[in-house]
Amino acid sequence: MSDMMKDPMVLRQIIMDHYQYPRNHQLSEEEGYVQRHMASDSCIDDIYVQGKVEDGVVKDIRFDGEACTISTASTSIMSELVKGKRVDEARKIMDNYFAMVDQKEYDEDLLEEAVAFANVGRQANRINCATIGWRCVRSSMKVKEKQMSKNKIELQDTYAYGFHDQDVSVYRTRKGLDAQVVETISRIKQEPDWMRELRLKAYDSFVKQKNPDWGPDLSGIDFDEYTYYIKPSEKQGKDWDEVPETIKDTFDRLGIPEAEAKYLAGVSTQYESEVVYHNMLEEVQEKGVIFLDTDTALREHPDLVKKYFGTLVPYSDNKYAALNTAVWSGGSFIYVPKGEAASVLFPHQQHADGTV
């Protein structure tokens, strides 16, 4: 730390500058921020702090509310210090700041202008003011890390399916989502006009709807970072030998051929956005049961699909139901004629003694 930063007058000027001209002093209405609110029992401080973390980097810090000089200045300095830093770097800065406030050993160079509050720990009634914004950000980072930890599947060496494939796709839409991507998916699939129009209505609903206020915090999802349609193969196989070797190898690891060898009543296997393998037991088909991938069902039984599609959870139900309706692909369509449900679900089985 330079000698200038040890001058009490310079430190006082730093505090007043950040109080009179606070940086990042406006909340954002955009999605992707984790917001925290804290208030003080001993001061006027009542602030809201927002943090946005993407790909392990603190992309933005914002704050607003009623706050004293110390609270405003310390939060302003903090927002400048941690913004643009990796999460581990930001955590190290905050750990050093709290060590400084607690009158413990800390890295002066790491804290830069925040050393203006080096003596605040000697004034017990000002500690809360000098740390309230920092505590908000530390709390929001913990929430984000907990969310990411909950949603992330760690692929350890001991995990049997911990592998990834090379890209074998024959076509994929560009990354990101807009009405043009939705129309492209429908056009590639050669869908009827009513399905294309349904997709576009659902996309419009998706854009307008906010994230649900129930369940986990989903505000950190960047929908433009995803590819919504990937076609892995030119055709669907009805015999396992027809499936491309690279895709077959993936399902071989997942046990699909073993399942087929055990004569499952019907198997429909999806890879990326398309069903690549479909097989159905003849005795079930003879009862009038329709078991197809949804794309084929839409072509061969459009009236049935139109009658039932999206009736259980309509796209208007929530933002993610709308997203699913807008960009759905693959999946299975099962239609069981009235009166056949019992015989399909519980077919007669002959035992070794001849009884059924």
Image (cartoon, rainbow, N blue to C red):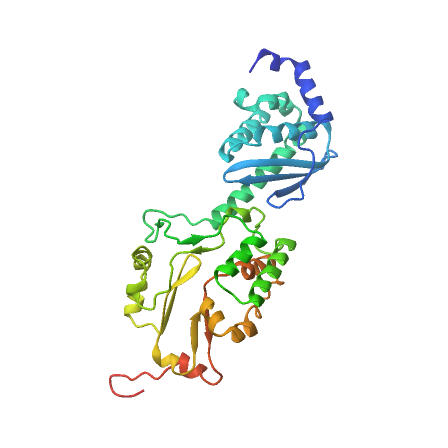
- In the displayed structure, 28 sits above or below 285; it is above
Look at 54% across and 53% down and name the residue there: 181
Q: Where residue 257 appears, x then y in whole percent?
A: 29, 64
For this rendering, which residue is in front, 6 or 152?
152
For this rendering, which residue is in front, 107 or 88?
88
- In the displayed structure, 16 sits above or below 34; it is above
Residue most toward the bottom? 355
Q: Quadrant of residue 236?
A: bottom left
Direction from residue 269 to residue 333 in the image, left or right: right
Direction from residue 330 to residue 75 in the image, left or right: right
Look at 53% across and 40% down and name the residue there: 54
Q: Where residue 86 appears, x then y in whole percent?
A: 51, 33
Which quadrant, please, contains the N terminus?
A: top right
Q: Quadrant of residue 201?
A: bottom right
For this rendering, which residue is in front, 18 or 125?
18
How many labels were placed on the picture?
Answer: 0
Which quadrant, please, contains the C terminus?
A: bottom left
- In the displayed structure, 334 sits above or below 39; it is below
For this rendering, which residue is in front, 34 or 233?
233
Residue most toward the left? 352
Q: Where residue 21 appears, x then y in whole percent?
A: 71, 26
Q: Where residue 209 appears, x then y in whole percent?
A: 64, 55
